Structure formats: structure tokens, C-alpha cells
Amino acid sequence: MSGILLLVYMLAFGLGCMTLALAIVYRLANAKRWATYFIVCHASLLGCMMLLALQVLSQMFLSGVAYTVVSIIITSVFLADLAFLIVFIPYFTTWVIAHPWRNPYKGLFFSLAAIYLGLGIAREVTGKMVLDQAMLFVFVFVMGFSLIVMSRNIKTIENKTARASALAIIIVSASMVPAILLALFFPALKPFLFGVYFLALSITIMTFLFITFVRIGRDDGAQTPKTELSLGDLEEYHITEREFSVIQLISKGLTNKEIAGELGISANTVNNHVANIYGKTQVRSRIDLLNLLKQSW
């Protein structure tokens, strides 16, 4: 059984590395923030897969004190990684669908992450399987919340590649529901659950990235080089047309008062637009905004 489990983990890890490499290449070719967040999320999941594989290897080849020390280290890092994902996955989900990361969300998922860590430590100390099932329930709840929110707001994702990837993740996750239910009633299946899900997810995302690269290659061959920043370049930040007009004038070096004169609006309105732009792009100054615009162009 350990050999089969290790094979599943290693296969998932290998395909996960390929998917991560393609995602990094996509991010280098397209300065999209959602791609950066996806890389962070996928790398964290990949780290979990590596740790699970190392755990199986330590069970197969180590014993005594050496196994105990290695197991404690692997388990500690694994729990920390999953606790991070319990917070990051909902944050990533709400960001992609352009919903603000409100305080209720922050409190809920940081609390769930702390609960997950506490359950993990208690499980290691007591060895009770009921705690293991509780940990699975917490993680499934977080994933379920994220998938439901994403599916209900899939149309708000403006980037076509991001929307297609999100839809694929929803479909793959939905297909795993029967396996998750079985794992709740048959704990012996749980070790395979994460590996199979990550394997299916990696294959799906890798396929979409390949398709995207082919489409980008065709578009590059058919289009002339761009000379100006367009509203479409900033679609991932959900910038409005009026905000884009402000951005264009900021890029020309105009002050807020001068922008107000150009657009025929009040200086306070311009200040509000600038504050909204900073919030959406997550920058703190004009210099940071201009640097971001250069990356998006």
C-alpha cells in the first residue's frame, strides 16, 4: 500500500512541477496579478505533496529516533502549509471575483487556520483519529466555501484564461465530492485523496496553459505591436473607464487639480478616483502605480 501511495504522490508532484513551471512562464509573459496568486497557491499545494511523499519515504526507510524526528519536522511544516492555504485560498478566490476581503472573512478563516493547527497538534499528541476527521472537515469546508463563491460569481472574472481555469477547477473539484464523502467514512482512503485531487488539478490547469500559449502565439503573429496602454490591459484590476481616464492623465504627470480641470470634475472626485485606483491595484503612490502600468503594458 505504501508503494502505491508513494507512486501517486510522486506522479502528482512531477506533474505539479510541470504545471508550476508553465504558470511561471505565463506570469513572465503576462503581468497578471491573478497568475502570481495562482503560483503562490499552487506552490503551496506542491509543497504539501512533497511533504506527503517524504512522510511515506520516512515510514519505509527510517525507524526509531530518526523516524520520530523527521516525522515531527515534516508534520509541523505540513500543518503550517495547510493553515496558510486555509487563509490564502479564500482570499485568492474573493480577489479573483473582485469581492473585497472583508473583516468577517478575515476573522473566520484566520480562526479556522488556528483551529486547524490546534487540531493537528492535538492529533499528534493524542493520536485520536476523530481529530484527523475534524481536520479534514475544516479543510473541506474552506474548499467548499471557495468553490461555491467562485461558481456563483464566475461571470465577474474578466480575464478569459482566469475564468476558464476557475471553471475547470470547479468541475474537477465537483467530481471529487464522492471521493471526499468516502474518505469521511473510510479514513484509509484519505491518504490517496489529496494526491488524486492534486493530480487531476495539475493535469487540467496544465492543459489550459498549453492552450493559452498556443492562442497567445497565434495572436502575437496576427497583431501589430501595441503603442499605448489600453483599458483591457488593466482588466484584472477591474478599472472603470473614468478611472482609466484618470490613470492616463497621471501617466502624463498631471496633478490631481490639473486632472480635475482636464476632466471637468472636482478635485475631491479625482481624489476619490485615485484612492479607488490605489485600492484596486494595491499600490501606495504614483510611482508604484506607474511602475505597475509599465508591467501591464
Image: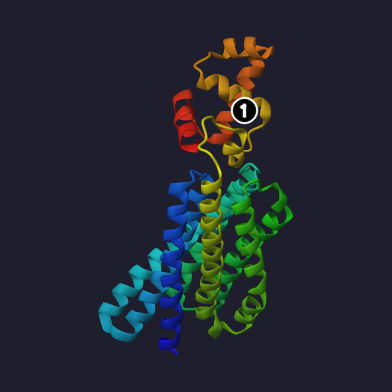
Asked if residue 43 shows in the view, the reply is no
Figure coloring: rainbow
Which of these two is toward me, 74 or 68? 74
Q: Position of residue 193 (x, y in %)?
A: 55, 77
58 is higher (above) or lower (below) than 32: below
Q: Position of residue 230 (x, y in %)?
A: 59, 33
Q: Position of residue 126 (x, y in %)?
A: 46, 76
Asked if residue 94 shows in the view, the reply is yes
Q: Which residue is mark 1?
A: 244
Residue at point 63%, 68% (across, down): 173
Task: Bin the neighbour count of mark 1 within 10 Å (Cα to Cα): few under 14, some 14-19, many 20 and up.
Answer: some
Residue at point 57%, 50% (across, down): 91
Which amino acid type corresponds to the residue marked 1 in the rendered image?
Answer: Phe
Q: Position of residue 199 (x, y in %)?
A: 51, 73
**152 to the left or right of 215:** right
Picture quadrant of residue 264: top right
Residue at point 63%, 26% (across, down): 243
Which of these two is toward me, 69 or 57? 57
292 is higher (above) or lower (below) than 125: above
**46 to the left or right of 258:** left
Q: Which structural element holds mark 1? A: helix
Which of these two is toward me, 279 or 115? 279
Instruction: Check the picture and name the quadrant holding the N terminus.
Output: bottom left
154 is higher (above) or lower (below) than 250: below
**How many labels, in total?**
1
Which of these two is toward me, 47 or 76? 47
